[in-house]
Image (tube, rainbow, N blue to C red):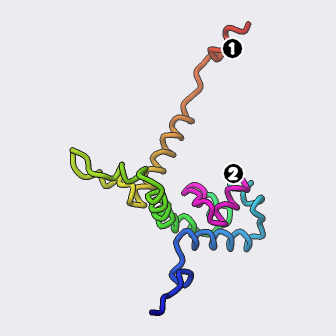
Amino acid sequence: MDRTPASSAAPAASHRFRVELRRWRTRRGLTQRALAERVRFSRETVAAVESGRRFGSHEFAVRCDEVLATDGRLAEMWPQVAAEQLAADGRRGPRFAEAARPGPAGPPDARHDPRDPRAMVAAIDELRELIGQVLAQPEPEGPPPSAAGRH
């Protein structure tokens, strides 16, 4: 019974992602620190993603694509990486599995099915939009409430 070693199997999406990230970073002559400064993430995050200790985020992939001029290759890989991340989270506990169980009202809404990587990307995009809306709200006029009592 000859078994194929796990290392000869097709590389996982997260492995392909970090190999591509490192390849593009070195091709552009950037250190991890230089890339981190340009994408506005920490050097530790860049190092952790490249080494496989972290999955990163869709935003990280998009910013790296922009800085490294990859024509969107990293962001294209992101849904498969997100699926691996969901699977890894599922092995750690019921965090996502609980939300995916059908409740008394029936099966979960497909748009919010945490097992679907497209749903994860859509949820992240929705969250980014909400954050953008909050940050875009105008500041209230007049001094801040805490400053009024200090005079």
Which residue is nearer to you in this view: 50 or 70? 50
Residue 45 lies in what quarter of the image? bottom right
Around disc 2, counting alpha carbons within 10 Å, would you say few (fewer than 14), some (14 to 19), or many (20 or more)?
few
Height in image: 22 above or below 107?
below
Q: Is residue 98 left or right of residue 25?
A: left
Q: Amino acid at mark 1?
A: Ala
- In the image, residue 98 lies at what x, y percent? 36, 49
Which residue is nearer to you in this view: 115 or 136? 115
Does the magenta run of residues contain 88? no
Residue at (52% x, 73% y) in the render: 12
Residue 87 lies in what quarter of the image? bottom left
Which region shows up in magenta? 41-61
- In the image, residue 126 lies at what x, y percent? 45, 47
Residue corresponding to mark 2? 40
* Mark sitting on residue 147: 1
Q: Is residue 38 left or right of residue 117?
A: right
Q: Amino acid at mark 2?
A: Arg
* Residue 62 seen anywhere in this rendered image of the structure: no
